[in-house]
Image (cartoon, grey):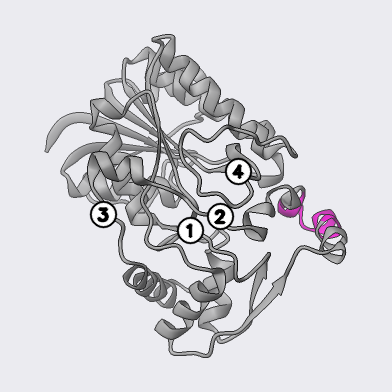
Amino acid sequence: MNAELHVVFGAGPVGLAVVDELARRHRRVRLVNRSGRANVPAGVEVAAGNAADPASARELCRGAAVVYNCLNAPDYHKWHEQFPPLQAGVLEGAAVNDARLVVMENLYMYGPHDGRPMTEDMPMNAARGTRGPTRARMAQDLFDAHRSGRVRAVSARASDFFGPRVRESAAGDRMFGPALAGKSVQILGDPDAPHTYTYMPDIGRALVMLGECDEAFGQAWHIPSAETVTPRRFVTMIAEEAGVEPKISALKKSPLRAVIMPLMGLFVPPLRGYDEVLYQFDEPFIVDASRFERLFGSFATPLRDAIRETVAWYRQNGAH
């Protein structure tokens, strides 16, 4: 086993995918979450801690060569309040211990972009709501810390996740659950607008590759995904793998949806403000990962294979 310590914050699907990849490479790993309990490969240390507490983060990162921030805010409707302290704590832990910092980001910082393929140098024009501007500020804070010499940082960005362990995603339980049951899948947005989906094991692999590449630091990188398809095609492929008839209903952009979404947020807190990111499903949402592929090569799992593995996982674990 490699003696370098890799510390992973977050035991959600991203953190566990990183742990899987590190274990496959025989790295020494410490996984950090609130409870100190997680189902991990043999030899992986699991530690309890609060990433938002800088003192706790400093101690948890002690001896680390690489730190991976795979955290998400626990309450989606409080994202703008809860997420920045988590990043600040992990950044402090990595900086004090002179560890390289790899951060998982999403694509909210770009905001509406008229359906153009997204590249890493696209302006961060997320001017609506709270989540996009919060994500943009966090990205700016991360690279300000890198440029100042406080920490060596790199970020990875991906589109909607799917795959084993992925539940809270536009391509998680809400899509695979009803599809496998032969029920109608509700699509929020245009079911025929091209949309990139990113396979979770590919995300874990990409984060580890970035953490080991000196040339990657100081930049953001889009993680490679399989071919971009429409939500309709994605659901159809799930149904084909499950051996059921595909069924889709769509809540497209309309005056009715503009009323329904805020009302739903009154009764379902995680949906509060969700309408501010619905542009992702109303227009083409295409991720260009050519910068990553030029440096590392293309390794995205073929979409049919990735969906097959995800269907098998849901059949074994069920939908919530």
Distance between the alpha carbons at the discs numbered 3 and 1: 15 Å
Q: Is residue 66 above or below residue 235?
A: above
Quarter of the rendering occupied by the C terminus: bottom right
Distance between the alpha carbons at the discs numbered 3 and 4: 31 Å
Q: Dot 4, crowdedness within 10 Å: few (<14), some or many (≥20)? A: few
Numbered label attached to residue 129: none
Marks 3 and 1 in Cβ contact (< 8 Å) = no
- In the image shown, does 186 or 45 lie closer to the viewer? 186
Q: Dot 1, crowdedness within 10 Å: few (<14), some or many (≥20)? A: many
Earlier along the polypeptide chain: callout 3 or callout 1?
1
Distance between the alpha carbons at the discs numbered 2 and 3: 21 Å
Q: Secondary structure at mark 2?
A: loop
Q: Secondary structure at mark 4?
A: loop
Earlier along the polypeptide chain: callout 2 or callout 4?
4
Q: Residue furthest left?
A: 1
- Percent coordinates x, y for residue 34 in the rendering: 49, 39
Distance between the alpha carbons at the discs numbered 1 and 2: 6 Å
**Which residue does the numbered mark 3 point to in the structure image?**
299
Distance between the alpha carbons at the discs numbered 2 and 4: 25 Å
**Which residue does the numbered mark 1 point to in the structure image?**
196
Earlier along the polypeptide chain: callout 1 or callout 2?
1
Earlier along the polypeptide chain: callout 2 or callout 3?
2
Q: Which SS does the magenta portion mostly show?
A: helix
